Image: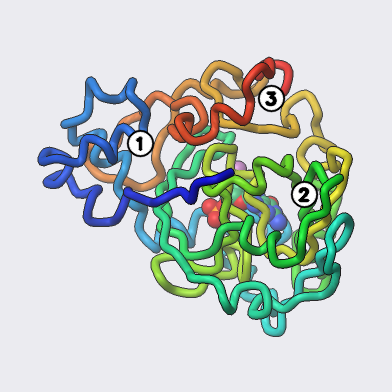
Amino acid sequence: MAYRWTNDLRRADVTPESLWLNRRQVIVGALGAGALGTIASPAMAEALKPNSWEDITSYNNYYEFGTSKEDPATNAHMLNTSGWEIEIDGMVDAPGLYSVAALTDDLTEEERIYRFRCVEAWAMVVPWNGFELKDILDKVGVQSGAKYVAFETALRPDEMPGVRYSVLDWPYREGLRLDEAMHPLTMMATGIYGKPIPNQNGAPIRLVVPWKYGFKSIKSIVRITLTDEEPPTSWNMSNRREYGFYSNVNPEVNHPRWSQATERKIGGGLFNRRQPTLMFNGYGDEVASLYDGMDLSKFF
Ligand SMILES: Nc1nc2c(c(=O)[nH]1)N[C@H]1C(S)=C(S)[C@@H](COP(=O)(O)O)O[C@H]1N2
Ligand SMILES: [Mo]
């Protein structure tokens, strides 16, 4: 991938005022050409406005702390994130146990405002702070035979009350194809709204892949493994009919129990309406080419 993605969606751009002026290209980039018809509507402005800190940190999915949306905010303080280390192994030149600081110290932290879409058909807009995953992987040297990246969340029964229930096969595991992992949109986030990322959102470091359903964005990562085989992932292991490896946001492929055609943004004000879900969550211009020639109803 030769280019670095630049974030042109900034907080000031998503106020209704600036929308009506000249931020057409921002909207096109964020929502796709299909949205042009409704560009100057308050509903569109609402759909692009970052969610409040309160929304982002009190309505979470982090099953290690319980399965209801309020559980992580109540329980995640139990996780001790000090001295956090990530094991990086498999097909890399420099495998080892790395502190977060060692992996990120010489990288420039960026803010990127991403739309986030959960498989349950709700959405948020989050201003993340963090780094491109690619910059971290480049540091350890990905070997030429590697084709996938596997991730694991910490598994600490003493600090995670939810893991005594076998709702998922712990530790929480996720994976990406190597080209997805190296894509400039793929981030390792360490902050939100310029503050350290709260525990319920995946402290101290979590993945963010904005064109995929939220569950791919694995939290509190302790292990990254480069491999030449598609790695097992927690949701696919728990229900392979409902959750595929790719899990790209796709309004045309429904989850067996929910339509994926529309979404509702969490919080929001007067103009918050159900919106059509966009292919690849609106990031199609950047990522559609990764899937050229693939049948996305088969590789869902
Ligand atoms: N370790 C871990 N990571 C996880 C989850 C989880 O249960 N455990 N839930 C996923 C799901 S389903 C979603 S929608 C997002 C939610 O991220 P947020 O709480 O920051 O909005 O985290 C994802 N990452
Ligand atoms: Mo989710």
x and y, in percent, of residue 26 in the image: 28, 40
Cβ of mark 3 under 8 Å from ligand 2: the answer is no
Earlier residue among tags 2 and 3: 2
Using the rendered view, name the quadrant where residue 296 is placed.
top right
Assign a secondary structure to mark 1: helix
x and y, in percent, of residue 87 in the image: 82, 68
Q: Residue visible at 22% across and 56% down?
A: 12
Q: Is residue 212 left or right of residue 143?
A: left
The amino acid beneath tag 1 is Gly
Q: On the rendered image, what quadrant is the C terminus found in?
A: top right
Earlier residue among tags 1 and 2: 1
Q: Which residue is mark 2?
A: 149
Q: On the rendered image, what quadrant is the N terminus found in?
A: top right
Residue 29's tag is: 1
Disc 2 and disc 3 in contact, CB within 8 angstroms: no
Q: Residues within 10 Å of mark 3 (few under 14, many from 20)?
A: some
Q: Residue visible at 70% across and 60% down?
A: 137
Q: Which residue is mark 3?
A: 300
Mark pair 1, 2: CA separation: 27 Å
The amino acid beneath tag 3 is Phe
x and y, in percent, of residue 143 in the image: 83, 53
Comparing labels 3 and 1, the label whose residue is closer to the camera: 1
